[in-house]
Image (cartoon, grey):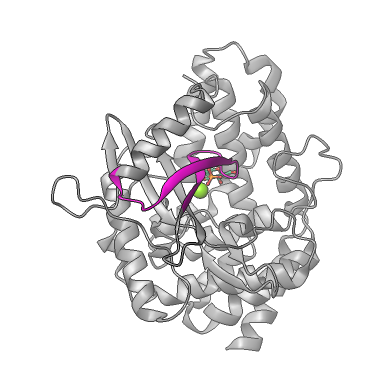
């Protein structure tokens, strides 16, 4: 079944109210808006009104999320990972803005989630802020680099193996390629003929795309705590100062490589176009944006990374773009069971865009590594 929403607005409002009650949200529910960012979970901003104690109305908002149980097969472990990581960060950054997951008391046990059949619901504090999808302002991009670098640094003394691998093989690029091969073989929707050129390109660059996975398997890179979804729109910014406030979307916090986080951030932020642009003639890697993110990220992390890790950063965006293209194309071949789509060819369009990006990255690999080396030298 495609990952789409079928509930009516009235039913949904009722549902959100019930969820709010289970988490003991105070006040009266009066409206909700769907937050459309994110390709996997369903997210809503819910608004409550209450007496402020002096007879005046006070409005308070919360973020309610229904976790995608198809993508996240181990929701309880996922919430345990989030708990451990947010607690650790809170201790390391006292006073800084943090994510807070509300508790239910339904069974007398304080839990940060509510299970209803296969659905996991949770409620997070709403942070008045802006997110940035477009990365035109290099200062904002640099601040996002600082935020993800700070996230990495705050967790450098956290034992990565304490975290569950909630999505096994999430960044196992070899496995993603294997799944593409299987989807081509099975071709359940008869879509292969249409995507043959894209599939052939991806298969032709497999060994370069799998460089990180191969180094990880050879144990040449340390396992760290990684965010695994470092899109710039997973950073909340202060609307006035444009300083980063907090990194959000911790669902994929798992053991991983620092190059996964760096490469994925660049794949998203330093693309001239959006990640699902149909205008692939314009898609490509913007080296100015790349530089801004690398500078911010390395200002926080350069001293803690090994030389081998630094040497993988320049190549990592290419690996991440190919990996995601492979995932989008596989999903398209299988009839879109995983990613939310807004129109029938959406996953194919996404795959084409990532392919165009990877082609441009392939000719900029030396420049990307030179920038990393320059920034590392500056901060070490
Ligand atoms: C998914 O749903 P969202 O936007 O947080 C995906 C990422 C992809 C991204 C591409 C758990 O993230 O891996 O990079 O879409 N998350 C999962 O937009 O698969
Ligand atoms: Mg995400």
| x and y percentages locating residue 188 in the rendered image | 51, 12
Of residues 317 and 101, the one drawn nearer to the viewer in this rendering: 101
Q: Is residue 68 in sight in this rendering?
A: no
Q: Residue at x 50, y 21 (%)?
A: 6
Return the x and y of residue 292 as percentages of the image width and height. 72, 71
Q: Is residue 94 left or right of residue 2?
A: left
Quarter of the picture holding the C terminus: bottom right
Foreground residue, 101 or 38?
101
Count of marks placed on residues: 0
In the rendered structure, which segment of residues is drawn in magenta?
22-49
Q: Is residue 363 left or right of residue 299?
A: right
In the displayed structure, does residue 312 sit left or right of residue 25? right
Q: Quadrant of residue 333?
A: top right
Q: Residue at x 31, y 57 (%)?
A: 81
Report the residue that reaches farthest toward the front. 55
At a point 51% along the width and 64% down the height, the residue shown is 247
Q: Is residue 60 left or right of residue 120?
A: right
- Using the image, determine if residue 77 lies above or below residue 90: above
* Residue 127 shows in this picture: yes
Residue 88's x, y, as percent?
33, 72
Which quarter of the picture shows residue 217? bottom left
Compared with residue 206, is residue 249 higher up or lower down, i.e. above or below? below
Which one is in front, 85 or 371? 85
Residue 115 on image: x %, y %: 27, 38
Residue 313 versus residue 15 in the image, above or below: below
Q: Is residue 367 above or below residue 284?
A: below
Instruction: Looking at this view, name the residue that lies furthest to the left.
Output: 108
Question: Does 41 lie within the magenta span?
Answer: yes
């Amino acid at each position: 079944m495609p990952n789409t929403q079928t509930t009516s607005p009235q039913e949904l409002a009722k549902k959100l109210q019930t969820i709010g009650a289970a988490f003991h949200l105070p006040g009266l529910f009066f409206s909700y808006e769907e937050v459309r960012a994110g390709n996997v979970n369903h997210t809503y901003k819910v608004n409550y009104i209450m007496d402020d104690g002096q007879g005046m109305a006070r409005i308070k908002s919360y973020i309610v999320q229904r976790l995608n149980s198809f993508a996240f097969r181990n929701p309880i472990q996922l919430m345990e990972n989030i708990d451990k990581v947010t607690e650790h960060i809170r201790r390391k950054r006292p006073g800084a803005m943090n994510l807070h997951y509300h508790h239910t008391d339904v069974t007398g046990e304080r839990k940060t989630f509510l299970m209803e059949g296969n659905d996991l619901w949770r409620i997070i504090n709403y942070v008045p802020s802006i997110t940035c999808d477009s990365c035109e302002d290099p200062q904002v991009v640099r601040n996002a680099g600082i935020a993800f670098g700070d996230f990495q640094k705050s967790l450098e003394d956290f034992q990565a193996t304490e975290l569950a691998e909630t999505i096994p093989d999430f960044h196992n690029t070899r496995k993603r390629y294997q799944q593409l091969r299987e989807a081509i073989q099975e071709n359940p929707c008869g879509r292969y003929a249409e995507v043959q050129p894209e599939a052939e390109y991806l298969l032709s660059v497999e060994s370069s795309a799998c460089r990180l996975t191969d180094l990880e398997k050879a144990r040449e890179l340390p396992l760290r705590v990684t965010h695994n979804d470092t899109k710039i729109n997973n950073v909340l910014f202060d609307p006035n100062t444009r300083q980063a406030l907090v990194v959000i979307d911790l669902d994929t916090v798992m053991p991983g490589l620092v190059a996964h986080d760096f490469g994925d951030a660049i794949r998203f932020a330093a693309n001239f176009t959006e990640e699902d642009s149909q205008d692939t003639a314009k898609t490509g890697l913007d080296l100015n944006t790349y530089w801004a993110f690398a500078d911010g990220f390395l200002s926080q992390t350069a001293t803690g990374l090994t030389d081998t890790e630094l040497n993988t950063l320049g190549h990592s965006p290419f690996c991440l773009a190919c990996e995601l293209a492979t995932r989008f194309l596989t999903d398209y071949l299988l009839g879109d069971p995983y990613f939310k789509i807004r129109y029938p060819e959406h996953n194919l369009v996404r795959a084409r865009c990532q392919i165009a990006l990877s082609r441009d990255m392939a000719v900029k690999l030396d420049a990307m590594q030179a920038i990393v080396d320059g920034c590392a030298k500056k901060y070490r």
